[in-house]
Amino acid sequence: MNGLSKGMPRALLEKAWLGSFLAAAAVWAAAMIYSGGQGGGQMLGAALSFSTFFVIVGIGQMLIIATGPGNVDLSIPGTIALAGAIAMKVMDGEDSLIVVGLAASLAAGAAVGAANYGLIRVLRIPPIIATLSSNLLVQSTAIAYGRGLRVKPPPAFADFTTATVFGVPVLALCAVVFAAVMAVVLARTVFGRSVLAIGQNMRAAWLAGVAVDRTRLLTYTLSGLFAGLCGALLAGFSGGSSLDMGMEYLLASIAVVVIGGTSVAGGKANVPGIWGAALFLFLLLTMLNTFGAGAGVRLVMTGLIIIAVITMAGGDKPAR
Amino acid sequence: MLKKSLISVAAVSAIFMAGAASADTADKRIALSNNYAGNSWRQAMLKSWDKVTGKAVADGIVKEAPAFTTAENQATEQAAQIQNLILQGYDAIVLNAASPTALNGAVKEACSAGVTVVSFDGVVTEPCAWRIAVDFAKMGEVQLDYLAKRMAGGANLLEIRGLAGVFVDDEIHKGIVAGVAKYPQFKIVGSVHGDWAQTVAQKNVAGILPSLPKVDAVVTQGGDGYGAAQAFKAANRPTPLIVMGNRHDELTWWKQQKDANKYETMSVSIAPGVSTLAFWVAQQILDGKPVPKDMIVPFLRIDQENLEQNLANTEPGGVANVEYLQADALKVIASAK
């Protein structure tokens, strides 16, 4: 598989990222047609706002998934809840403490990520189990720490997270820049190259002198860090932190990565695809809500459409 | 090991039989089996339980009343927990169940071992258990009754539902549908699932809003009103009448709007302190009092007049709460007969 895709990676990669954007455009158009063309711009604005959070955690999740089969971070929901609670509590509604609060939540996220890799490397627990159990620990810590406390974000922080320029959310623009930077990091730095090399064959990468341990530690730490960032921003955006605010990111963070064209088998990552996939998932739900579909129909449709999009736009044909 | 536990169960049952005859609960042990603790409502529920039972233990009304919560919100896990509680010899188990039917086997085992089971909020269908149920459909209907008074000429409604596939969501939705049938001047123009979480409600309302005509009122299930308000604000739409669900953030927002522009609405939910009502009912049953198997929990409804008073009693991040007294339990028992 890798042998084949090595010959034409450009075309395939581009096709994979285009696919999720095309799918997003299609569901958006369908929703627009149904509602008689009204509110299309606002719908896109909302999609950009909410996709931002999925993109931030999705990029962290992508780094981990790209390091090969079995690597996944299931501790994202707990980390988001904990980081959100820490950010709001440390900021305590004061504009002057925004930076401190942000730093505290990022540190908490990075610590969770590093601890995850500790469980995986030192205790030799498979990532899926290690991160799932650390999610329980972190979520419980968030409950004990926050006790359901919903402290309001400082006004300046709330304004920043909800600000728009010509209808485009500022946070989304930042996330586009962030994604662009991460795409360069992945393609042009030793770290990015190491992630993909490990994903293709960990032993070969190690024999070739890639710092396997350090790279994997960094992927888990970054994923935790990004989840921490997402938690703090989400708490600012939605007017305070809540214990259940990370819940939907458990599977959604994996879904945006896979729909975006990153290979679950590792070794092949796709940053722009995450943006397309996040927009697609949001607009898909919006479209089905606009149609007035019941919950059952909606879930079935969501499943079927995701399968269809992955099959059509997944790009990577098995080499047989 | 098994033999030993069987003997201890038998011994405990024997003690239980003897205790019931003397009509005194000072030596009784009541456990709370709870399936979930991950939101503010459940946190308040556990806190109320600790507060009220702590006092009851100090006053010598019962011997002990610890709370146990399962980690994963799974029926199988809670069934195992109930079996442990039986082996540990509790006289009564107060139960907020993960499933109305999946725990019936474990509940039946408890009953056979002579343990009194009182389920509340998440009730079980097993006939040997007591049920303190919430009339969720009524919770949906009262919202429409209120709207009919406020908007006699009719209105466009946005419905925010709870978690798809959960009994409570279906029941409240049924009540809302029944209310709309009763007052045909109302029209539901859109419906989204908010999963009883502010962030999810905010996201899904923000998604559907652009495609909707003017929304005059939002009917909700609790835990979603503040998120809806945020979504309307972000979309630069006029704030509709949003029915609230007693959460602190919802009440705080309502109070701000009330002070700023005389905003009027109502708020309805179940007080998390219903766990303490279940505690007192269990205590009454252990005391040998006749108690009907099915009871209904009163709502906690907040209106324009008593908003400030309720907000003052609600702690930040929590839910408006009432802790019940023994006398309240007697009232609920009496009204069920």
Image (cartoon, helix red, strand yellow):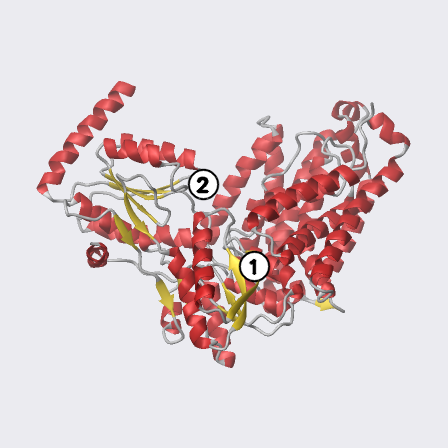
The answer to whether residue A234 is left or right of residue A209 is left
- Please indicate, yes or no, whether residue A178 appears anywhere in the rendered image: no
Q: Amino acid at mark 1?
A: Ser
- On the image, the x and y values in percent for residue A253 come to 65, 44
- On the image, the x and y values in percent for residue B228 come to 55, 64
Sequence order check: which comes first, mark 2 or mark 1? 2
- On the image, the x and y values in percent for residue B256 come to 49, 74
Q: Are marks 2 and 1 on the same chain?
A: yes
Residue B89 image-quadrant placement: top left
Q: For the C terminus of chain A, give its image quadrant.
A: top right
Q: Nearer the viewer, mark 2 or mark 1?
A: 1
The residue under the point 67% across, 53% down is A282
Q: Which residue is mark 1?
A: B191
Vertical placement of residue B210 versus B279, above or below: below
Q: Nearer the viewer, residue B147 or A283?
A: B147
- On the image, the x and y values in percent for residue B305 come to 37, 76
Residue at the right extreme of this rendering: A7
The residue under the point 21% across, 34% down is B114
Task: Measure the C-alpha gap from mark 2 to mark 1.
Answer: 27 Å
**Secondary structure category for the residue under label 1:** strand
Circle 1 packing at 10 Å, graded few (<14), some (14-19), many (20+), is many
Residue at the bottom extreme of this rendering: B261
> Badge 1 sits on which subunit?
B
Q: Nearer the viewer, residue A319 or A111?
A: A319
The answer to whether residue B14 is left or right of residue A37 is left
Vertical placement of residue A316 versus B299, above or below: above
